[in-house]
Image: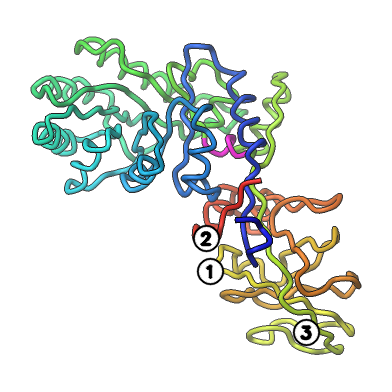
């Protein structure tokens, strides 16, 4: 469907997405495979839309849940899909049936996958997750040999990969914690080799490490936020520039809505719930059909801005569930039906996910991933 059929929608720039993959692949050796992380509705960009666009660009896909993996299979994605998050015991059969890979860090999950594999006469491929200092999913390096030895007892379990996740790689000033985690991961690799699994697919790097630390690339990189044209942090962008990495990332997502009404209001008129703001002059107010249900954070009340006819219009009063009001007094030509940009470019100006994140005291990951998945994603 074209954007003209929607009142609020998300645009996905297919050329920008593919450009980012190619830029990022320039950093990798030919032997390192590229896993596109499409969890959380592809960071708000649209799970199935992104995966299908990258069918010829990404060798692997990473999802959080079995349901995300099944959705990709239903859309015809045949590439390896790694489930990064936890899968309940009663859903492990779905992992095997769809040929998904599962991150494993406990015996019960492995035994459940083995039972499902036996029942279906189909092997379950697993990736061992090692705890090296992020203190979330994972087993300690010294436990790796134990679970791999247990895997040997079932012909329906295939240890395919071994992974960890870095907690502090974006600290470009003190890399001691990063180096300690990498050392712990190498200890786990030694354990796996001694147990008879020297050739597991090794993966450590998410976006920041993929951008800054070639020594973390190993056999596979798991790229999320950078894939969508957003730097993991300003520090990472600066460090990449200092180290001469010529990398141009293009934002993939724009978020847009339309003016539903324009009205004239006199000086002193309160706007929205709680009478939290009154106009300080005779004003023109535009009502936009987007609110916190859609992912436009309520903390942007009286603080957010949108672009209309290339000019900035400030949010007035409180963000409502399905509406916001903005000041278009200076945008004299603004009228019902006009496009309003919440994230993206218009004329010579831009409102980025980073800008909204700064206003909200958060990170662009959250801003993007919380855009309501029910909003239509339009490929441009």
Q: Tell me how far mark 2 sits from mark 1, CA to CA.
A: 7 Å
Q: Tell me the residue at 62%/55% (across/down).
A: 10
Taking the image as drawn, is residue 327 in sight? Answer: yes
Q: Position of residue 110 (x, y in %)?
A: 17, 33
Q: Tell me how far mark 3 sits from mark 1, CA to CA.
A: 24 Å
Q: Residues within 10 Å of mark 3 (few under 14, many from 20)?
A: some
Q: Does residue 109 appear to the left or right of 35 in the view shown?
A: left
Q: Does residue 206 appear to the left or right of 63 in the view shown?
A: right
Magenta highlight range: 224-228
- Asked whether disc 2 touches disc 1, contact meaning CB atoms under 8 Å apart, the reply is yes
Q: Which residue is mark 2?
A: 372
Image quarter where the N terminus lies is: bottom right
Taking the image as drawn, is residue 103 in sight? Answer: no
Q: Residues within 10 Å of mark 2 (few under 14, many from 20)?
A: some
Q: Tell me the residue at 78%/67% (across/down).
A: 338
Residue 278: image tag: 3
Q: Tell me how far mark 2 sits from mark 3, CA to CA.
A: 30 Å
Dominant secondary structure (helix, strand or loop) of the stretch shown in magenta:
helix
Q: Which residue is mark 1?
A: 293
Going from N to C along the chain, the mark reached first, 2 or 1, is 1
Q: Tell me the residue at 77%/74% (across/down).
A: 336
Residue 167: image tag: none
């Amino acid at each position: 469907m074209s954007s003209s059929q929607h009142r609020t929608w998300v645009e996905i720039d297919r050329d920008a997405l593919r450009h980012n993959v190619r830029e990022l692949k320039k950093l990798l050796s030919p032997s390192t495979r590229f896993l596109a992380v499409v969890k959380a509705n592809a960071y708000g960009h649209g799970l199935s839309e992104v995966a299908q666009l990258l069918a010829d660009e990404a060798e692997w896909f990473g999802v959080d849940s079995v349901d995300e993996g099944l959705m990709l299979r239903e859309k015809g994605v045949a590439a390896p899909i790694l489930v990064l998050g936890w899968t309940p015991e009663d859903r492990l059969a779905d992992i095997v049936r769809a040929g998904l890979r599962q991150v494993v860090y406990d015996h019960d999950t492995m035994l459940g996958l083995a039972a499902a594999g036996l029942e279906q006469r189909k092997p379950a491929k697993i990736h061992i997750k090692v705890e090296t200092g992020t203190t979330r999913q994972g087993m300690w390096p010294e436990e790796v040999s134990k679970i791999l030895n247990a895997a040997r007892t079932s012909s329906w379990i295939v240890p395919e990969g071994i992974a960890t996740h870095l907690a502090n790689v974006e600290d470009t000033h003190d890399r001691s914690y990063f180096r300690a985690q990498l050392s712990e991961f190498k200890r786990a690799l030694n354990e796996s080799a001694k147990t008879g699994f020297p050739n597991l697919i090794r993966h450590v790097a998410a976006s920041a490490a993929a951008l800054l630390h070639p020594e973390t690339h190993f056999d596979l990189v798991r790229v999320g936020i950078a894939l969508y044209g957003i730097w993991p942090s300003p520090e990472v962008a600066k460090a990449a520039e200092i180290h001469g990495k010529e990398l141009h990332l293009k934002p993939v997502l724009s978020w847009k809505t339309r003016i539903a009404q324009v009205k004239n209001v006199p000086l002193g008129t309160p706007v929205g719930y709680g009478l939290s703001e009154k106009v300080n002059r005779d004003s023109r107010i535009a009502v936009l059909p987007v609110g916190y249900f859609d992912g436009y954070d309520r903390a942007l009340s009286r603080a957010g801005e949108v672009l209309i006819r290339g000019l900035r219009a400030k949010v007035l009063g409180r963000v409502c569930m399905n509406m916001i009001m903005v000041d278009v007094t200076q945008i004299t030509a603004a009228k019902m039906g006009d496009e309003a940009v919440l994230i993206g470019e218009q004329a010579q100006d831009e409102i980025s996910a980073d800008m909204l994140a700064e206003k909200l005291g958060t990170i662009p990951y959250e801003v993007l991933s919380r855009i309501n998945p029910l909003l239509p994603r339009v490929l441009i």
